[in-house]
Each structure stands twice: as structure tokens, then as C-alpha cells.
């Protein structure tokens, strides 16, 4: 039995295998339509979610399985004081695989120690979001054809953004990837990411506060929102929330084959006028996310054709 708590729980070869399986599901969905018949997936979302929760539910239904769970902590026994450990032990008797989102870093790891069923981390505070990273990776692979040699721009909230932390961990294992980190000084990438992952792996990177200055050299622009829920000070959030807004005018500086990703939800960091630009990949990204989660469910449950 395996869990997915961090993207580093998967080898580079396993990530490539998941992408291959997801691509096969996209091309031949009928082969997978009943493969999880009789199986149940539990979604335990102690924190709000739209895309991640619904994409997991859609993934399991399209594999022929069933779904149970809750979409907010207030609708679970957590509101009565039940511990995460007790919740997991109970749900383990009802489901074959458990997807969990929690505002506290490390909660899914604790859960994995208390269950005999696979745990999938669907986001734990500002720490990890490995299945979003899988959605990001399949999007990059389908849109650009490869990972090696790409210049990846990460823009916005790099301090609290769990999606960018996981993406850096994953892409750092591919050859000649260069990161350009674009953020206000207050929201720069944490030192542990730069030291333990990038410098330790001899991965090149640069930091800047100026999006327009670097836009022309990017192969991928990964936009993120400034997350109100991660701030203790409302004044700081208001001051920083509109630091970067991508518009069609700014995109005139970008390559014609650059691709724009965003984990969503967006607030106003990407103008809706950008949505019709062929470089805008973020809605395709959400769809690819469903297919890669289908592949992940199959892998962790040990189900094959």
C-alpha cells in the first residue's frame, strides 16, 4: 500500500508512467469506464475546494466507482471535536482510497499513519499539493511536448503557494530546467525551497519583482493568486493582492508558443481578456487534472486493465 503526501513520493519514472496512463485514458476512455466498479473513494475536505474535489469525484465516477465524503469541516464530526486520527480510522472502514485536504501542514501525513487505505494529499496548508502538480506536469507535457530545457516563470505568491513548492520539487528532477521567480519581496520563495531543492540539485534560478522584464524568455508562465486565507494581517493582503495582473498588452512581450498555467481559482491576476489567447492553458489544465487523478487512483489502488 502506498500514499501520496508529497510529489517526491513518486519517482520521475512513475510520474512519466502516470502521464502515459492519463494520455491513454484521454484517447481510450471506454477501456476504463468500469475498471473501479464496486470501489469507493472518500473525499475529506476540511478546507474549501472546487476543482480538486470535483475532479476527484468525476475521476472516480468515470472509472465506474462511487464517492462519499464531505466538503467542509463544519459538516463533519470535526465540528464536535473529533480528531483527524479518529476520522481517518472510521472512514477507512467505508472506502478503498481517501483524498484529504486540510488547512494544517502535515495533517495528511498523520492520517497516513492511522489507516490501512491509501491517502492522497489534496493540499495541506501552505505545504504540499501533489495532485495539482501532476495536473501541472501533464499540462506542460501535452502543451510543450517535454520538460527538459524549459524556462519556467513562477509568478505571484511564492511564499505560501503550495502549488509552486510542489512544482519546483517535481521539475527539478528534469534536465536543464531554469526557474524565474517573480514576486513581491514579502512573498518570495522560501529559503528551504531554494536551498534544499534548487541549490542542492544544482538547478539554476533567478528572482525578480518585474514580470515584464522577464516575460519574453519564458516557456511557461505559472501565475498564482495572492491567498487571503494565508495572511494574518488583512492590510498586508490588500497591499499585495494586485501585485501582478496579466493582460493582453503585457502578453505582447511573450513568446508565441509560451503557455500560461494557473492552479485556479483566479481573482484578478489574469485578465479575462487573456482567456481567448491560445497560450492560455489554465482551463485545459483543469481537464487534464481529472485524467491524471484517474491514473493516480488506479496506481494507488493497484488496479490495472
Image (tube, grey):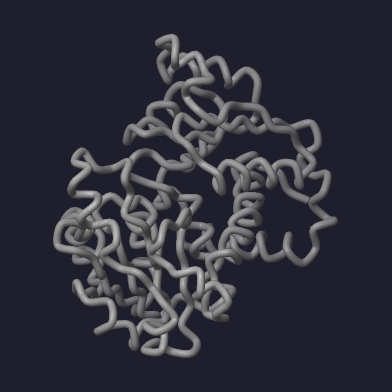
Q: Is residue 145 visible?
A: no
Looking at this view, is 254 or 178 the one in front?
A: 254
Q: Position of residue 67 (x, y in %)?
A: 69, 32
Considering every residue shown, the one lying at the far top of the view is: 80
Relative side of 293 to 123, left or right: right
Q: Is residue 166 visible?
A: yes
Q: Position of residue 149 (x, y in %)?
A: 39, 82
Q: Residue at x 48, y 90 (%)?
A: 256
Relative side of 166 to 39, left or right: left
Would you identify the image quadrant in which residue 247 lies? bottom left
Q: In the figure, 75 relative to 105: above or below?
A: above
Q: Residue at x 80, y 63 (%)?
A: 28
Looking at this view, is 172 or 14 the one in front?
A: 172
Q: In the figure, 258 relative to 106: above or below?
A: below
Relative side of 147 to 90, left or right: left
User: Which image quarter holds the N terminus?
Assistant: top right
Would you identify the image quadrant in which residue 98 lies? top right
Looking at this view, is 168 or 176 the one in front?
A: 168
Q: Residue at x 23, y 57 (%)?
A: 240
Q: Position of residue 304 (x, y in %)?
A: 73, 48
Q: In the figure, 6 relative to 185: above or below?
A: above
Q: Position of residue 33 (x, y in %)?
A: 82, 49
Would you identify the image quadrant in which residue 36 lies? top right
Please tell me how many numbered marks the rendered image carries: 0
Q: Residue at x 51, y 78 (%)?
A: 146
Amino acid at each position: 500500500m502506498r500514499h501520496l503526501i508529497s510529489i517526491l513520493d513518486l519517482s520521475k519514472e512513475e510520474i512519466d508512467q502516470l502521464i502515459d496512463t492519463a494520455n491513454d485514458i484521454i484517447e481510450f476512455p471506454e477501456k476504463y469506464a468500469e475498471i473501479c466498479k464496486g470501489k469507493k473513494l472518500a473525499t475529506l475536505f476540511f478546507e474549501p475546494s472546487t476543482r480538486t474535489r470535483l475532479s476527484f469525484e468525476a475521476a472516480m465516477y468515470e472509472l465506474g466507482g462511487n464517492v462519499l465524503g464531505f466538503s467542509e469541516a463544519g459538516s463533519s464530526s470535526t465540528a464536535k471535536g473529533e480528531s483527524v486520527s479518529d476520522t481517518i480510522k472510521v472512514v477507512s472502514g467505508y472506502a478503498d482510497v481517501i483524498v484529504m485536504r486540510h488547512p494544517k501542514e502535515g495533517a495528511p501525513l498523520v492520517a497516513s499513519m492511522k489507516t490501512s487505505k491509501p491517502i492522497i494529499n489534496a493540499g495541506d496548508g501552505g505545504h504540499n499539493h501533489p495532485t495539482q502538480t501532476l495536473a501541472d506536469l501533464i499540462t506542460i507535457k501535452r502543451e510543450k511536448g517535454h520538460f527538459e530545457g524549459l524556462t519556467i516563470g513562477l509568478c505571484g505568491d511564492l511564499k505560501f503557494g503550495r502549488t509552486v513548492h510542489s512544482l519546483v520539487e517535481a521539475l527539478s528532477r528534469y534536465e536543464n530546467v531554469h526557474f524565474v521567480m517573480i514576486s513581491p519581496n514579502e512573498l518570495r520563495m522560501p529559503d528551504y525551497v531554494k536551498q534544499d531543492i534548487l541549490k542542492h540539485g544544482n538547478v539554476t534560478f533567478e528572482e525578480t519583482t518585474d514580470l515584464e522584464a522577464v516575460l519574453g524568455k519564458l516557456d511557461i508562465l505559472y501565475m498564482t493568486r495572492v491567498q487571503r486565507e494565508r495572511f494574518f494581517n488583512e492590510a498586508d493582503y490588500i497591499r499585495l493582492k494586485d501585485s501582478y495582473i496579466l493582460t493582453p498588452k503585457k502578453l505582447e512581450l511573450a513568446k508565441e508558443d509560451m503557455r500560461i498555467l494557473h492552479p485556479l481559482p483566479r481573482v484578478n491576476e489574469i485578465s479575462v481578456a487573456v482567456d481567448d489567447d491560445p497560450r492560455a492553458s489554465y482551463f485545459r489544465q483543469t481537464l487534464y487534472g481529472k485524467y491524471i487523478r484517474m491514473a493516480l487512483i488506479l496506481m494507488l489502488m493497484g488496479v490495472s486493465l
